[in-house]
Image (cartoon, coloured by chain):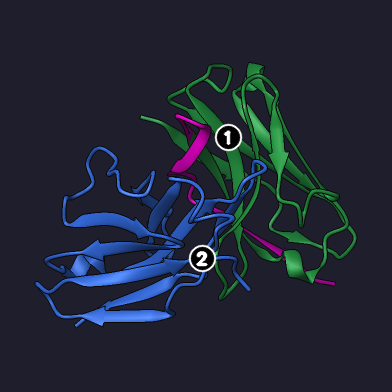
Chain colours: A blue, B green
């Protein structure tokens, strides 16, 4: 069982927006501004989409945004495109130099 | 451009030791630009962080794997490695080597990933 809780699946239509939640505790998500999000297309290397809760690496579309409230972080994807269909994972620093992941969310673009 | 490539055996028997190597190109592991680490994904399951190492030699481990894992670095070859002893079927997974960006608190997000290597533990 993963330390961070994500919905198993979400879906949205082309052009719409979706939000994926990531719920942790006051020992991880709620204590540090170190939540990151990863996009994973099966058979490929995962890709960093958001770091430090809400920052986008260079080259990542501004359709992807991150936010956090208390112990829950969220990834929002606006203007859904077919290429966004993938698995998404959240990750948080958990103190004592350790990192924890969520179980992953499968995004289906209808 | 930073690139990472894992190498190692694809099949092990229970109780054996898994040894994986990550070859880094596009950056030197002997500088302060990144931490370096390993993450795995068992079939049908989520990601699990295993260990990370910095150029100073500082290393840290997942508490659940700490007793069986060693991460090390070879600056001369620009490689870092993972050893996991006493493997069981539960260690079957895709193993990724990763770079970890250096942020305001030190180690930060995992910004570059290798393609991953499948490791199967079976008798």
The answer to whether the residue labelled 1 contacts the one labelled 2, judged by CB atoms less than 8 Å apart, is: no
Res. A102 mark: 2
Q: Is residue A97 left or right of residue B46?
A: right
Q: Nearer the viewer, mark 1 or mark 2?
A: 2
On screen, residue B73 versus residue B85, left or right, reads: left
User: Residue B58 appears in which quarter of the rendering?
Assistant: top right
- Picture coordinates of residue B43, whole percent (x, y): 59, 72
Distance between the alpha carbons at the discs numbered 1 and 2? 21 Å
Q: Is residue B43 a member of the stretch shown in magenta?
A: no
Give the residue displayed 22% in from the left and 65% down from the top.
A83
Using the image, tell me which numbered label, if any, was put on residue B112: none
Residue found 29% across the figure and 40% down from its top: A57
Q: Is residue B27 above or below residue A11?
A: above
Label 2 is found on which chain of the structure? Answer: A
A17 or A33, nearer to the observer: A33
Snapshot quadrant of residue A63: bottom left
Residue A2 in percent (x, y) is at 59, 69
Subunit of mark 1?
B
């Amino acid at each position: 069982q993963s330390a961070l809780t994500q919905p198993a699946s979400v879906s949205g239509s082309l052009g719409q927006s979706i939000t994926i939640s990531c719920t942790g505790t006051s020992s991880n998500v709620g204590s540090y501004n170190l939540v990151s999000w990863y996009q994973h297309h099966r058979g490929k290397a995962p890709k960093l989409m958001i770091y430090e809760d809400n920052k986008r690496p260079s080259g990542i579309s501004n359709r992807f945004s991150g936010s956090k409230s208390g112990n829950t972080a969220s990834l929002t994807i606006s203007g859904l495109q077919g290429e966004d269909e993938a698995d998404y994972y959240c990750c948080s620093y958990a103190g004592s130099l350790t990192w924890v992941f969520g179980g992953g969310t499968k995004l289906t673009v209808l | 451009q930073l690139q990472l490539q894992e190498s190692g055996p694809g099949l092990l028997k229970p109780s054996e030791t898994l040894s994986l190597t990550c070859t880094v190109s596009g950056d030197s592991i002997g500088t302060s630009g990144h931490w370096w680490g390993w993450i795995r994904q068992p079939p049908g399951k989520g990601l699990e962080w295993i260990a990370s190492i910095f150029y100073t030699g500082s290393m840290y481990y997942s508490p659940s794997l700490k007793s069986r894992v060693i991460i090390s670095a070879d600056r001369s070859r620009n490689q870092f490695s993972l050893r996991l002893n006493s493997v069981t079927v539960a260690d079957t997974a895709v193993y990724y080597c990763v770079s970890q960006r250096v942020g305001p608190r030190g180690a930060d997000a995992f910004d570059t990933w290798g393609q991953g290597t499948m490791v199967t533990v079976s008798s």
